[in-house]
Amino acid sequence: MIETIKKHIAEVQAFSSTKKEEIENFRIKYLGKKGLLNDFFAEFKNVANDQKKEFGQVINSLKKSAEDKVNELKESLESKEETKGIYGDLSRPGEIIPLGSRHPISIVKNKIIDIFLRIGFNVSEGPEIEDDWHNFTALNLPEYHPARDMQDTFFIQTNPDVLLRTHTSSVQVRYMENNKPPIRTISPGRVYRNEAISARSHCFFHQVEGLYVDKGVSFADLKQTLQYFTTEMFGKSKIRLRPSYFPFTEPSAEVDVYWGLETEADYRITKGTGWLEIGGCGMVDPNVLKNCGIDPEEYSGFAFGVGVDRIAMLLHQIPDIRMFSENDVRFLEQFKSVL
Ligand code: PHE
């Protein structure tokens, strides 16, 4: 019997738990009304007299061990619960908060905006759902003008006066209608064209268009502004203006930047020419100024437009425009370090 009790003492001393329920079960097992200790005490009268002393000692020792153990475990449980409070266990290591990243389109768009803010341009925005006037007619494209075919347009079927803007030139119209020269504004935003989707073109993409209207604005101002832009944006200052046609500018030009032919990638990007087209530009057609309530006899202006997606693809070596809208985090996560 004494041996059994001694085993229990060892068991009690070895016991450990952080669970309230387990500790309570342990208490009941030894110290409860029908617990082992009471059983052992009841045995006392049957124990031979010469063993009574030792028996009493081990029983008391078991009782004390069990009591001490229960108190000790309860105390440590309580002190743990205290530190938990409403914030949980404050001593636990913090949880890692995943770092987000900007979308590459936003990164490039913000960079372009920043470059033009530095030379006195402001930022203007307008609706993506436009009317015919702001997207076409005011921009010198009357209803049956063949140049409307240049941009396949998403119209709302039941109302051809409602469409998704095909360029942010519509914002420039709105800006001219509501502001007097001098005007220096850039209009970043998403635009839509009914084009087949491929690695190089999408039915929606992003533009930043610029507009400068004041007395005596010349083509030289346009060229200098574009050169400033390419230098700041790409670190390349050599540009070329190729004659072109836009209904809303006259004269009009395509803007090419000399990218160079130093690496294999340069050859690939520029198709072996060294030159890369980045957008369109021109002097605002006097008709457009008139349509927007600005006297073309008094004022002149230039406008330009660049594609944000193309520039982002170029700067970050993104092979497929569709990646911008797939929302694959493995792609987006790569821009964590860029602001
Ligand atoms: N709006 C033209 C386009 O979307 C770009 C452009 C803007 C061209 C301003 C000339 C001047 O293609």
Image: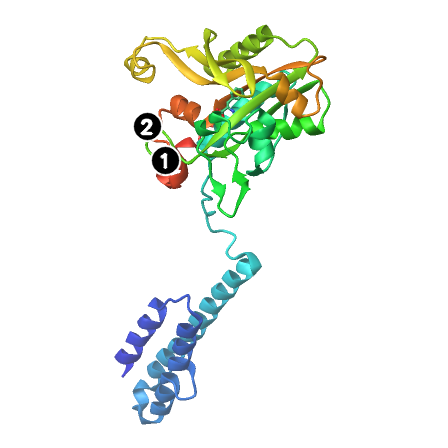
Mark 2 CB lies closer than 8 A to ligand 1 = no
- Residue at 61 percent across and 28 percent down: it is 138
Asked where in the image residue 140 lies, by quadrant, the reply is: top right
Residue 135 coordinates in the image, percent (x, y): 56, 32
Q: Is residue 184 left or right of residue 70?
A: right
Evaluate whether residue 184 shows in this view.
Answer: no
118 or 214, which is in the foreground?
Answer: 214
Q: Amino acid at mark 1?
A: Met
The label shown at residue 323 is 1
- Measuring from the top left, give residue 107's x and y in whole percent: 49, 29
Task: From the viewer's side, name the closer residue of 167 and 40.
Answer: 167
Please determine whether, in this image, residue 251 is positioned above or below residue 79.
above
Residue 258 at x, y percent in the picture = 41, 9
Which mark, residue 81? none
> SS class of the residue under badge 2?
loop
Please say if 36 is above or below 109: below
Q: Quadrant of residue 174?
A: top right
Q: Quadrant of residue 272?
A: top left
User: Which residue type carries mark 2?
Assistant: Pro
Identify the residue position indicated by label 2 in the image: 319
Q: Position of residue 191 (x, y in %)?
A: 49, 33
The image's colouring method is rainbow
> Could you give the CA–CA distance between mark 1 and mark 2, rounded to whole angstroms?
8 Å
Badges 1 and 2: C-beta atoms under 8 Å apart? yes
Note whether residue 195 is visible. yes
Residue nearer the viewer, 179 or 56: 179
